[in-house]
Amino acid sequence: MRRSDQSILGCLLLLLLLGACGSGSNEANQPVSAAQQPGTLQADPALEQSLTEILLAELDRLGKLPDRTVATPPAGEGNAVFHVLVDATPPDGLGAQGSASLMFYPRMVGDYDGNGEVGISDITPLGQFFGASVAYDDPLLHDGISYWPAGDPDGEGRENWIKARVDGDGNGEINVADITPIAIRFGEHTDGWRVEQRFSADDDYSFLPHPERDEAYSVGWRELAEGSIGYLLEVSWPSSGYLEMRTQAWDNASAAAGPMSLSGLYEHPAGDCLAFLQADPVVADFPFTTTFTAAGTSVLADSYLLDFGDGSSQPVASLAEFPLEHSYTESGIYDVVFTVSCEGDQAIDTFQIMATPLPCELQVQLGVMPDNGFAPLNVLFDATGTSSGAVSYILDFGDGSTAFESANLAELAVQHEYTETGEYTAVLTASCAGGGSVQSDVLISVGNLSDECSVNLSVTDNTLLIGTATEFFFSGTTGTAALLDLGDGSDIVFVNLQGPEPILYEYAAVGTYLAELSIICNDSKHSDSVLVFVQPEPVVSFDVSGGVYQYESNPPIGGPEPDKFPMENAEIEIYSIVDDLVLATTTTDAEGQYFFAGESIGLDVTKVYMVRPTDAERTKHLPLDWFPGVATIALPEPEVVKVCTDINLLASAT
């Protein structure tokens, strides 16, 4: 240094000391609020002027012109970012994508006001904090870094970190010596920060582009501070569960970067190999689209494979790909299998998707007697030949009247009166559990009575016990003679319409008979008919038995019944539908059989009963369900024991 420069510097130092101490103010030594940034405290003007003159003298000594600087990026390892934090939230498999965050705290020696450039303006924060002390952590706590400020930079340590930015030489005191770093670094400049990341320790780092603009840096100098002295940058979640990030300053004018920071690392813990798959909906009419999610599944699996059960499957790279959609275009029950592989281990989750209506394999046959006649016409319907096991049977008479509906096939023996002339299509519909249905229909023709040709057959009692006679009447029938077919195969009876009525007749066997009266009128045949029901002598009571079993596998739709084994000690009850009353309970034996003594519990053939598992028995096996769940008893034949349909417990929940 020249003698004249030394004299000037000595005078400035004297002025500096006078400015700092002779004014009677100790403002520079006052504590700084954690909320204060450089620029919110006021430096002594004389002190700031003195510091500026010292800086200018030092720049002159170094041969630097304060008004003519060439921008360069920060240089030297001291300008490497030393505090880098990486955190992540894995995808939840429910549609929320995973995310990661980078938090870093820039270090740019000499840039005391934090504007991204070392210049004259950095004298201001030096004056504001002149004389203050800075606390640093033990270097052994931070890989030997001696200038790591103590405290939480975004908490109670914020004040200390702000002052540490002004302590350019890192000696723990903010004083005149901190002018030298400004002079040495004068003109160094940063437009932003380049961020690099990699998803495996074996991968190369890749540049993280700016989210909005085509820049050579990832984040601008002041873009993401958000009130912090650090920078928070949100990035995408790495599918591998490993994320390593680092950063360095970037200067656009020189197209050059500063020193690379330490790297921050996040690794999601591997944990157990877990597979959990959800779907919505799981039952719907085809074609439909199901959305799959995988909440709770292992994040760090080697592979994921989703088999949709319809012959198609999809490999999945990571949970970040959920939710996934798949369309089912045909009816059926599909076994969905989700396989997760983790370093030799494997986890599987499976459930069923049902595309309804399922094929309905029931056989339906509707019988009527008679299918034609004059109004009013009484018709007997029956479902002989129809399969049991439907969830419901609906008989629509076709004349606009209320349809008859029942879940019990035995109840479909019903009568209906057609009061108006016309042709009616009666339809029996049986609905399957899977949503499909099958139908059978019959055409019924109802003619109109006229004054010229009328036929009228009536009976005193069309429901009678065996051994009891009934009377047939013919009043209102045209002509003098008619023929009566009693419907039991006996000889045709000649009826003298002028003679006395009625004709008395006793049927010889139990059964349902269609008696028909016929005349010839206007050269054509006309007839009318009535149904006669001959009942057996009533059975006072009957016994009930049956079996309870569990399937080894669930029965396929329309397929054969699978193997099953008897359920011992299953609690079964017999229930009166008429009286709304549970009559008795019992338990099954080692062969799965149960027995109810009808006389002791008062079973009556005129009532309808169900045999079913008790509520307690059903609860004991949840979530499994029973099929068919009930056995219905209606109008048993006069044998001693009524054998019911088996009651089966399904093999798995559906």
Image: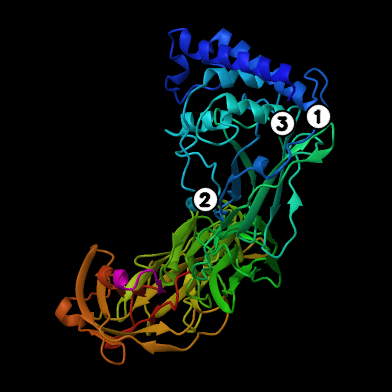
Quadrant hosting residue 582:
bottom left
Residue drawn at x 80%, y 36% is 215
Q: Is residue 373 left or right of residue 219?
A: left
Q: Amino acid at mark 3?
A: Ile
Q: Is 15 within the magenta?
A: no
Is 623 contained in the magenta span? yes
Q: Badge 2: how crowded within 10 Å, few (<14), some, or many (20+)?
A: few
Q: Is residue 207 above or below residue 297?
A: above
Figure colour scheme: rainbow
User: What secondary structure is found at the residue carrying circle 2?
Assistant: helix
Q: Earlier in the sequence, mark 1 or mark 3?
A: 1
**Circle on res. 184:** 3
| Magenta region | 618-627
Above or below, 212 relative to 334: above
- Amino acid type at circle 2 is His
**Dots 1, 2 in contact, CB < 8 A:** no
Mark 3 packing: few (<14 Cα in 10 Å), some, or many (20+)? Answer: some
In depth, the one of 454 and 125 nearer the eye is 125
Label pair 2/3, CB-CB below 8 angstroms: no
The percent position of residue 214, horizontal first and vertical second, equals 82, 36
Label 3: which secondary element: helix
In whole angstroms, how far apart are the C-alphas of marks 2 and 3? 27 Å
Q: Is residue 615 left or right of residue 231?
A: left
Residue topped by disc 2: 142
197 is higher (above) or lower (below) than 22 = below
Sequence-wise, which precedes: disc 1 or disc 2? 1
Residue type at mark 1: give it.
Ala
In contact (CB < 8 Å): disc 1 and disc 3: no
Left or right? Give the position of 1 relative to 114: right
- In the rendering, at what x and y percent does residue 114 appear? 63, 27
Please give the residue where the numbered disc 1 appears in the rendered image.
Answer: 71
